[in-house]
Image (cartoon, helix red, strand yellow):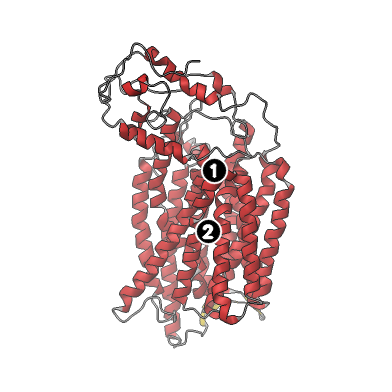
Amino acid sequence: MSSTLHHPLLPPHPNTSTQISMDRSTVSPIITQHAHEHTAKVSAAPTKSFKGAWTSAIFIIFVEVAERFAFYGLSGNLITYLTNDLHESTADAAKNINTWIGVSSIFPIVGAFLADSFLGRFKTILLSTMIYLTGLVLLTLTVSVIPMNHRKSVFFLALYVLAIGEGGHKPCVQTFAADQFDEQKPEEKSAKSSFFNWWYLAIVVSATSAVLLVIYVQDNVGWTEGFGILAGAVAVALVIFLAGMKKYRKEAPVGSPYTALVQVLIAAARKRRVNETLEGWGICYEDDDKDGADLEVVGQPRARTLARTEQFRLLDKAMIIDNMDASSNTRNPWRLCTLNQVEEVKLVLRLIPIWLSCLMFTAVVVQTHTFFTKQGSTMIRSIGPNFQFPPASLQSLIGITILVAVPLYDRVFVPMARKITGHPSGITMLQRIGIGLFLSILQMAVSALVEAKRVSTARDHGLMDNPKAIVPMSVWWLLPQYMLSGLADLFTVVGLQELFYDQMPEAMRSMGAAAYLSILGIGSFINTAAISAVQAITSKYGSVWLEDNLNRAHLDYFYWVLAVMSALNLCVYIWVAKGFVYKKVEGEETEKEERSDEP
């Protein structure tokens, strides 16, 4: 196979912007060179046989369940520890929690880069889980043996050690588990379709258990015992994860996939003045060697060829063979790129507007960790004559809602919707996300109405200036807003997980998970900024909306602000979703969801 780019029928020409129109056969060497480069990277030796599928995934689920158990066991009651033991104000505690959650959701970008480029997902999970366990042990020591004058600084140090551990854990565990299902096998591809629902159900079970069990221990036994349970759970899960290591399908890191993306952008920029021919684009660099399709890169799944799309057509110029390319003896990857490279860049660019239009959703979600808990602490929480329901354990209502809703969604809603839409999943991923965004607006509206009712009850009973008094109003008034939060999560969070796994280039799926998680992080920062802005603006007019005395505060007004912002955000999302084009793969049937979508 020839590796030269020079062809006698195409002499060098100094003007690279000249229109190119020639028969494809005149540049056959350049068209087939990609196959030459590809086969140099593959091995004809048979790949190892792994059991994969649920047999492997179940071990990975344990480590995710333990991490979520620890995260919600900590974050769910963190505002109580910060306000009661470290004596922070409610607003400052809320901002500190939002900042920590935000940083924890930004670090996965670094972890995903290391996993995709150097370490691989298995090693990244192992290392990050060990770091996470170290943070939990330090946290337990902080609340038990660290002197009070150093406790706050060491406590926050432990929190951010946990954030570093999550940086490697979050983008890799779900992706690594999904990798156990081979998309080339119909039965495993079908199993993966339901995997994301049941995966989410498993972590909801762990989160619900944490806010019921661990938070009760923290409130009624002690913080040392509460944090010790979290460390023990992660230690056990780490052992289980290692026990299944021989069953895993492990994909080897392929080197930085981001270099290929940058090459497309630079190559397209260099050829920005290349004109189109009457037939469309000029002669393009494609892989016409079909023999290479049967070979597999060791440690990687069989590569799939992406179909050409019309969106972002300027990037297609990176594939055009101009005079300089044709006269060169070797392909310059910074001037000439493959079809797959170009289409992978398009995949990433399409997800950016979706990412931006979902940030507001998280600004709503984080209320469940902060202000919802403070609301519940002021209301009647008695169950029977001797039991007080911990206010932070109200978050279990979200998990219970999801536990009931996931089986109904998977077994009832999807089959019914499938009959109407003809879509394999009932509704598309973007439609699922859009429904969740709408439910988050309802959640904030209901929360505002309930808070107004709570304040009205406090006023009627003369409790406006007694913030520690229990308002004679049942905590179960908060049930609708927690249930709406659970339903919104079921639609939007699971939809985002599936979208950012399915639509990212296969070599960047860890980064896809990190991108989805960073939505949670940036949304937390947005909420922190909103709290600071509301405090600054309202303090100028003598009536601070988010003061420590919730009876005098105007938390309901803050909820209405979030509702309005979420409604505007939904309008932007619908506009973005209408122009979205799903990934298309050569040789696969085009489904309805591959067309433009409208939630």
**Residue 293 placement: quadrant:** top right
Looking at the rendered structure, the secondary structure element under dot 1 is: helix
Q: How many marks?
A: 2
Residue 341 visible? The answer is yes
Say which amino acid is labelled 2.
Gly
Say which amino acid is labelled 1.
Asp
Residue at the image point whose x is 40% and y is 72% from the top: 556
Question: Cα distance, mark 2 to mark 1?
Answer: 32 Å
Percent across and percent down for residue 557 are 36, 71
Write down the residue under mark 2: 486
Looking at the rendered structure, the secondary structure element under dot 2 is: helix
Residue at the image point whose x is 41% and y is 73% from the top: 555
- Say which mark, if any, is on residue 116: 1
Percent across and percent down for residue 120 are 59, 43
Q: Residues within 10 Å of mark 2 (few under 14, many from 20)?
A: many
Circle 2 or circle 1, nearest the eye? 1
Foreground residue among 560 and 276:
276
